[in-house]
Image (cartoon, helix red, strand yellow):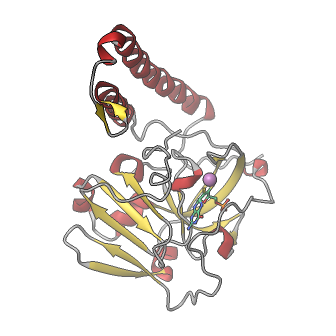
Amino acid sequence: MKKLDFFDRTEQESNKKLQRRTFLSYLGFAAAGATSFLGWKWLNRQPIDNGALQPLRSTLETNEKILTSTFSEHHLVKTYPVEKAVKNVRINSLIGLQEDIDETAWRLIVRKGDGSTIPVSLDVIKKLPKKEIVYDFKCVEGWSQIQHWAGVPLRDFIVALGLQSQTKMKYIGMQTPDQRYYIGLDMPSALHPQTMLCYEMNGQPLIYQHGRPLRLIIPVKYGIKNLKNIGEIFFTNSKPRDYWMERGYDYYAGL
Ligand SMILES: Nc1nc2c(c(=O)[nH]1)N[C@H]1C(S)=C(S)[C@@H](COP(=O)(O)O)O[C@H]1N2
Ligand SMILES: [Mo]
């Protein structure tokens, strides 16, 4: 049984890390919970801000900060042996996908903070060291599947392009070429070692329904953030718009 250990760690080790991470975020929520319980009466007299009572809104923001700061690259999502990967990968939603992409003419647009752009061909991306991952992909609609993906870790791609200085910015945004589907990522999640630009699934080039020629696989987030058919990647300090956040889902959308 060949285990695809993309991260050179035992499963046991990563499970321990997972437990620690869960515990830390639990602590954050417990502390926030106690605060809102004790202050309940006072809370009810407070003004409304952004749809949530103002103090509650800041608690939500504090929770987001706690989650972001306890989050580090050492908290790896659990991986599986390749035989566990499903053969029939679910196709979920097709916003912004294109059936007829000419892969030789195709370019990924990388936009730096100053607005300048770098067009990158698929060939260049495929020449970077390829990594694989087998993990449990989770959709917010309540289904999950163990899936097998391959491509280049986003942070290796950034380093290969010499764009390390751009990672001092707060966010990375991505969108489809037609801009119909778009996502925003906090920088730590974007730079997580399991976050990848993928061009293969189950050892085969992607079909367009799964995001050909290039899609994002970001195991620390729900499916909604795993943008298919990436047209542009940009670095920014202002929160990029996000398709599902605009429709009521949590911006962070972390697991
Ligand atoms: N361009 C694009 N990317 C997308 C979506 C989409 O509709 N369009 N749906 C998202 C959602 S909600 C999920 S669960 C996953 C599904 O990926 P799959 O169809 O390859 O299983 O893609 C995500 N990325
Ligand atoms: Mo989803």
**Residue 243 location in percent, x, y?**
48, 59
User: Of residues 111 and 43, which is closer to you in this image?
Assistant: 43
Image side of residue 164 versus residue 214, left or right: left
User: Of residues 221 and 49, which is closer to you in this image?
Assistant: 49
Q: In the picture, residue 184 is in which quadrant? A: bottom left
Q: Is residue 205 visible?
A: no
Image side of residue 134 versus residue 251, left or right: right
Residue found 28% across the figure and 68% down from its top:
162
**Residue 172 location in percent, x, y?**
35, 59
**Residue 146 location in percent, x, y?**
71, 48
Q: Is residue 83 visible?
A: yes
- Where 62 sits versus 3, above or below? above
**Residue 205 location in percent, x, y?**
66, 74
Residue found 47% across the figure and 78% down from its top:
177
Furthest-top residue in view?
38
Residue found 30% across the figure and 73% down from its top:
111
Q: Splitting the image into four quadrants, where does ligand 1 fall? A: bottom right
User: Of residues 5 and 29, which is closer to you in this image?
Assistant: 29
- Where 78 sits versus 2, above or below? above
